[in-house]
Image: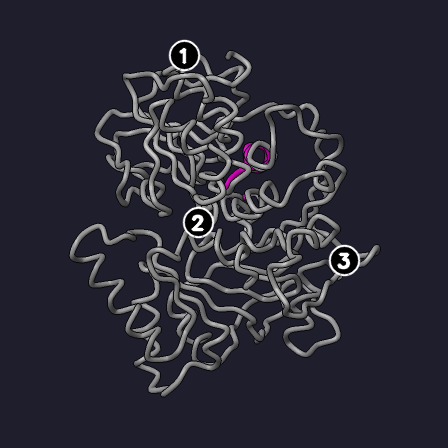
Amino acid sequence: MTLAEKILAAHCGRERVSPGDFLSVRCDLVLSNDITAPIAMREFERLGVPRVFDPARIVMVPDHFCPNKDIQSATQIKIMREFARRHGIIYFEVGQMGIEHVILPEKGLALPGQVIVGADSHTCTYGALGAFATGMGSTDIAIAMATGEIWMKAPTTIKFIYHGRPGKWSGGKDLILHTIGDIGVDGALYSAMEFQGEAIDTLSMDGRFTMANMAIEAGGKAGLFRVDSTTRRYLKGRTKSKYRVYEPDADAEYARVIEYDASKIEPQVAFPHLPSNTRPVSRAGNVPIDQAVIGSCTNGRIEDLRLAARVLKGRKVDPHLRCIILPGSQQVYLDALKEGLIEIFIKAGAAVSTPTCGPCLGGYMGVLAEGERCISTTNRNFVGRMGHVKSEVYLSNPAVAAASAVLGRIAGPGEL
């Protein structure tokens, strides 16, 4: 069996599962946020179940419109907060919260070998830890909160092998953008994406989180990495909970095996209006921008901010644009503060925000007007994603976004 099949089999009491099997799978962690939780709570109440199946396995994080953007978002969050308190659910309040897919691994809640479901498509982020993690609709999450189980079909698995090592300014964001550009936004439709190879072995956890996060942008059901010494170092000190590590079998059957030479993948830019519309930054041409955003559940971790700071240190953001930087969690913010990164950003002329999803989904803290262009380290650039339907979003890694903020146009850090 593949890695995904091993984990699913262990969570549904079967010796073996195969692609296409219909399964009732036990959940280790159930997640929702301020947009999706109220819908799940409403459906939960309709079930007439008095209590959630296990409050220690349910997490709610207000992060999309938090701190409260307006009265409507304040009402949504109030409903979620009260439900969490009533049921004893794990809840992160403003001041402790961050972007859900950053703080759950950071707090040691997401662990290897788990099945994690969330009412957010980027729940697949936790596959970086060797978990089977996937996004589901809010009604599915209501059932999971009540029963501790979800119904699903076992996916096929595609293995991606990355040979060599990424170049100086390339990382996980560039590997996954290049992959999506190659196979398309439906290239891994309802498939588990299993990432392997020398480039993966040398990739940091932050880089792995970025790749797993964007499995959904290729249509994937999940994106998984094997647990290795890098994973264990990350987990050390974060959790005292026991976890089980699964390995794919040597004779596992894959729907496809796709191989890349990572040393030839330079920093990528996804042009509007699809994550698959990628090209190397060296072929971006002259594209002036109005805004640069560095952050999100994709690239809002400390390594991402360090990369941006390397580019911005001693330089100034072009006065004709806005550069907005959003640490992914309070811990990331604190680490960046201790390391002097926040000072670098402010001296460069960037705005630094409290942790929030904010502009990624066109929520707030950087919504685009008609005709504006933004280069962003987020994960989607669909029509109207960050604001007006006639605005444009370009996706990149933090170094490219920072260099673009300095030069006023899409550019790689090599130009500086």
- Which residue appears at 54% of the width and 26% of the height? 268
Q: Is residue 229 left or right of residue 293?
A: right
Residue at mark 2: 329
Of residues 284 and 305, the one nearer the viewer is: 305
Q: Secondary structure under badge 2?
A: loop
- Check disc 3 and give the amino acid type: Pro
- Which residue appears at 56% of the width and 71% of the height? 28
Residue stretch in magenta: 177-186
- Check disc 1 and give the amino acid type: Asn
- Which residue appears at 68% of the width and 46% of the height? 195
Disc on res. 248: 3
Q: Can you tell which of label 3 and label 2 is closer to the viewer?
A: 2
**How far from the left and from the top, in percent, is residue 213?**
52, 47
**How far from the left and from the top, in percent, is residue 158?**
67, 49
User: In the picture shown, does residue 310 fall above or below 258?
Assistant: above
Q: Secondary structure under badge 3?
A: loop
Question: Are discs 3 and 2 less than 8 Å apart at CB?
Answer: no
- Check disc 2 and give the amino acid type: Ser
Question: Are discs 1 and 2 less than 8 Å apart at CB?
Answer: no
Q: Is 178 inside the magenta-drawn segment? A: yes
Q: Is 400 inside the magenta-drawn segment? A: no
Disc on res. 148: none
- Which residue appears at 63% of the width and 70% of the height? 241
- Separation (CA) of disc 1 from disc 2: 34 Å
Name the main secondary structure of what is drawn in magenta. Answer: helix
Crowd rating for badge 1 (residues with CA inside 10 Å; few <14, some 14–19, many 20+): few
Location of residue 34 (image quadrant): bottom left
Nearer the N terminus, badge 1 or badge 3?
3
Residue at mark 1: 286
Q: Secondary structure under badge 1?
A: loop
